[in-house]
Image: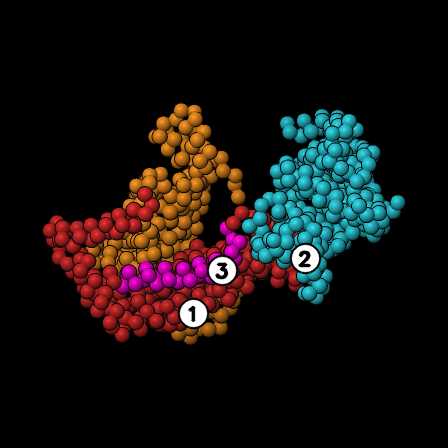
Chain colours: A orange, B red, C cyan
């Protein structure tokens, strides 16, 4: 009994989003006092702010400010995230594969894990000051744990039968790692990378709220400071859109790198 | 091998701490204000544990997290199960949920401050927002999976809708709900620390930022450890609930 | 003999994403099952056996033809038709006793009575020591016995079993076959027996258990032949060695071999 997904339900699915938009427009028509406008900016004000931020070239940057902030956020995200992958995947493989690494390294990793990336922000600020390094570090830290945990799980979850079959056909250790364990663990690792990217986004916003002078997190924090709610909303929309796009990208990567995995 | 693990691990930690205390300062020369030494952290810890302000902060933060988590659970479980059992409800809300979900709760901090001011209300709102999505999505998946795997068996036993809901849908979805609650509480704990750093005059997040601005790195590190410990405490409480409420969960399916 | 379940020209189509993906699972399927009869259905895999069983259970709507129980069209699931699923579908959150009690709970029986009836059936399948265990604590054979007890506890007139022994080991299967005959009521007069529709892919299982064996064609499933089983009741283990037993098994295999080979290859 398939769930109804026909065109007939599309109208029904649109009811709530449209109702919310209508409510927004309606309320902003009714509530016109300056204090109300500061709580609930009318759509055209948000549109204006979006145009201002995304289209008007900033005299200092030579580019529209929204693009500058987005570019800064993405750059930090990419740096921290790639660094997390570069460290977490080899480490996870080592922990999953070698008993020594499991005994002496894994418990240290597990001990650090409960301290959330957000809690590191003050220390990172003290170490690296306000700026890119702090944010990159927080992203790195946030993305690191899901990736390492999934890598360990993926390596450990590799069926012993596969390994035995490989040994029986005369494979050496390295080849087993490369041809059996890595491919078998890859789907799990990619899942960890996807979760890590999500945590990375949370971390970057949190870090930029307090730890930088640029980036989308800084943009909304600063706009809030100036009671400029329109720009806050525009910044939030930008964060949401980039979050969706990066998650889609990861999903696409999953289908490309793991073609043998049945799609959900 | 196994019995030797923990003595060796302890030894390893002691060596690391010793290197940190006595060797690192000779290499890194920026001074202990930036690089807290184990002994300083221990001192900071002691003075922190003795201060009433610290304990008030802990109570404030945990209270806010639990309040927001309760709101998120109440709404998320009801809505999630409705989504899982009724395709109409799912179709009604899924676009909205999919549009709101990608935005991390931290991105709501500025607007929450504008809406609710600095303090409890915005903190609770942000925690609820962060915890809501894992809870609602897991509850929906649980109800849906239960209907798929056990709905036929329930129907052919002649059970009516209410009995099916009470004895099949709810218990079947329970482990999923609890899983969502664990994830949600973890997110909520992260969110509250972040929210208090920016938008509160109280709580652990505020305290740790304040310690940093007074250059009390020993307190900063002590607060981090406390934040980690509370996180463990919250999660293991729910884990225990999960184990007791659903002992069959994660075992070979029946 | 009274007709208990009757299928007349039943057709069932599963719509795919595109019209060309549609699968015709059953076409013009006609079959009568008598009250108190043990009827087995065999056929190549994917020929629509489960589809038919689910339709009788009221879990799947049919597109063509008609389906009756006691002369009344089947429209929805009901307690008068119990189903035993291949993967058991025991509720993991209920103990053995609660699982067995569930259909009695659905009938609104008082607790004490429920207990008593459940205890009787749990004893019948020899699970008394495991009454308060959860399904994950049981072996495959024990799960199957629990599913059998749950199946009959609500006293349905018709038992629908979909490859119930497919996932237990070969020896347990032989033992459970006898148990199924006992639960069905082999030792009772026909009027007091339940009606069983038993889907299996194992031909000798069908021959050992059934009064009649319905052989289906490959998809779209139609009735190819009904084989009446001459073996005497009660069925005893030694029958498995009889020439009649082997000959019947071979005859039925001859009927489905080509279709079965085709089913693996496609
Ligand atoms: N829910 C469904 N949706 C689409 N096709 C189905 C569905 N259930 C069964 N089928 C198809 O219908 C055919 C008959 O299935 P089934 O009755 O399960 O066969 P059997 O039990 O004899 O192996 C198969 O080809 C199967 O793929
Ligand atoms: Mg089948």
User: How many angstroms separate mark 3 from mark 1 (CA)?
Assistant: 23 Å
Label 3 or label 1, whichever lies nearer to me, is 3
Identified at 79% across, 44% down, the residue is: C186
Q: How packed is label 2: few (under 14 Cα within 10 Å), some, or many (20 or more)?
A: some
Chain identity of mark 1: B
- Please, is residue C184 above or below residue A176 in the view? below
Q: Quadrant where the C terminus of chain C lies?
A: top right
SS state under label 3: helix
User: How many angstroms separate mark 2 from mark 3 (CA)?
Assistant: 26 Å
Q: Which residue is mark 1?
A: B67
The magenta span reads B223-250
User: How many angstroms separate mark 2 from mark 1 (CA)?
Assistant: 46 Å
Tell me if I can see residue C92 in this picture. Answer: no
Majority secondary structure of magenta residues: helix
Drawn side of residue B117 relative to residue C58, left or right: left
The question of residue B232 being in magenta is answered with yes
Q: Which residue is mark 3?
A: B244
Q: Position of residue A231 (x, y in %)?
A: 36, 62
Identified at 79% across, 32% down, the residue is: C224
């Amino acid at each position: 009994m398939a769930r109804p997904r026909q065109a007939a339900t599309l109208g029904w699915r649109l009811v709530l989003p449209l109702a919310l938009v209508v409510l927004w427009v309606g309320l902003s028509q009714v509530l016109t006092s300056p204090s109300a406008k500061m709580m609930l900016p009318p759509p055209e004000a948000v549109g204006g702010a979006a145009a201002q931020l995304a289209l008007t070239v900033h005299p200092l940057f030579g580019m529209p400010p929204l693009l500058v902030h987005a570019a800064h956020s993405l750059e930090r995200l990419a740096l921290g995230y790639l660094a997390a992958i570069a460290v977490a995947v080899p480490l996870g493989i080592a922990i999953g594969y070698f008993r020594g690494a499991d005994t002496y390294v894994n418990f240290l990793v597990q001990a650090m894990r409960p301290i959330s990336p957000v809690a590191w922000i003050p220390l990172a600020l003290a170490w690296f000051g306000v700026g890119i390094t702090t944010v990159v570090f927080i992203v790195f830290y946030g993305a690191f744990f899901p990736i390492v945990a999934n890598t360990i799980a993926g390596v450990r979850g590799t069926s012993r039968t596969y390994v035995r079959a490989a040994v029986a056909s005369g494979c050496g250790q390295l080849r087993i790692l490369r041809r059996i364990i890595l491919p078998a663990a890859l789907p799990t690792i990619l899942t960890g990378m996807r979760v890590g990217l999500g945590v990375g986004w949370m971390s970057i916003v949190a870090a930029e709220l307090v730890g930088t002078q640029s980036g989308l997190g800084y943009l909304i924090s600063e706009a809030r400071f100036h009671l400029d709610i329109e720009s806050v909303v525009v910044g939030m929309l930008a964060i949401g859109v980039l979050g969706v796009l990066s998650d889609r990208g990861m999903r696409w990567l999953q289908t490309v790198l793991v073609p043998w995995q049945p799609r959900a | 091998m196994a019995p030797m693990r923990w003595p060796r691990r302890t030894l390893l930690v002691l060596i690391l701490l010793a290197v940190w205390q006595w060797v690192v300062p000779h290499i890194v020369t920026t001074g202990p204000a930036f690089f807290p030494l184990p002994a300083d952290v221990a001192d900071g810890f002691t003075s922190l544990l003795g201060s009433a302000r610290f304990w008030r902060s802990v109570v404030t933060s945990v209270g806010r997290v639990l309040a927001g988590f309760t709101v998120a659970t109440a709404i998320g479980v009801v809505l999630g199960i409705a989504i899982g059992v009724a395709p109409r409800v799912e179709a009604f809300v899924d676009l909205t949920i999919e549009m709101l979900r990608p935005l991390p709760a931290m991105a709501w901090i500025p607007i929450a401050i504008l809406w609710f001011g600095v303090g409890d209300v915005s903190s609770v709102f942000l925690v609820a927002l962060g915890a809501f999505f894992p809870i609602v999505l897991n509850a929906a998946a649980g109800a849906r999976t239960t209907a798929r795997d056990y709905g036929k068996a329930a129907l052919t036993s002649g059970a009516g809708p209410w009995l099916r809901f009470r004895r099949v849908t709810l218990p079947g979805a329970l482990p999923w709900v609890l899983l969502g609650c664990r994830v949600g509480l973890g997110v909520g704990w992260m969110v509250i620390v972040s929210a208090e750093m920016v938008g509160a005059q109280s709580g652990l997040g505020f305290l740790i930022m304040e310690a940093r601005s007074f250059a009390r790195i020993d307190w900063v590190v002590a607060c981090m450890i406390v934040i980690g410990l509370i996180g463990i405490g919250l999660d293991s409480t729910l884990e225990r609930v999960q184990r007791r409420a659903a002992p069959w969960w994660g075992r070979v399916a029946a | 003999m009274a007709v208990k379940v009757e299928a007349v020209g039943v057709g069932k189509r599963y719509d795919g994403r595109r019209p060309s993906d549609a699968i015709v699972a059953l076409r013009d399927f006609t079959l009568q099952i008598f009250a108190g009869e043990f009827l087995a259905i065999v056929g190549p895999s994917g020929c629509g056996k489960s589809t038919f069983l689910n339709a009788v259970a009221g879990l799947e709507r049919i597109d063509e033809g008609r389906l009756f129980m006691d002369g009344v069209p089947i429209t929805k699931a009901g307690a008068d038709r119990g189903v035993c699923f291949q993967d058991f579908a025991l509720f993991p959150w209920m103990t053995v006793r609660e699982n067995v009690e569930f259909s009695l709970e659905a009938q609104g029986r008082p607790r004490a009575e429920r207990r008593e009836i459940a205890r009787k059936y749990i004893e019948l399948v020899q699970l008394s020591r495991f009454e308060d265990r959860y399904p994950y604590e049981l072996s495959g054979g024990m799960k199957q016995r629990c599913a059998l007890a749950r199946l009959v506890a609500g006293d349905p007139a018709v038992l629908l079993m979909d490859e119930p022994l497919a996932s237990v080991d070969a020896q347990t299967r032989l033992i459970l076959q006898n148990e199924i005959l006992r639960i069905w009521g082999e030792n009772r007069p026909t009027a007091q027996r339940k009606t069983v529709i038993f889907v299996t892919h194992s031909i000798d299982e069908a021959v050992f258990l059934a009064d009649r064996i319905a052989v289906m064609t490959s998809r779209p499933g139609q009735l190819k032949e009904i084989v009446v089983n001459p073996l005497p009741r009660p069925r005893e283990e030694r029958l498995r060695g009889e020439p009649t037993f082997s000959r019947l098994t071979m005859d039925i295999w001859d009927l489905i071999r080509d279709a079965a080979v085709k089913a693996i290859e496609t």
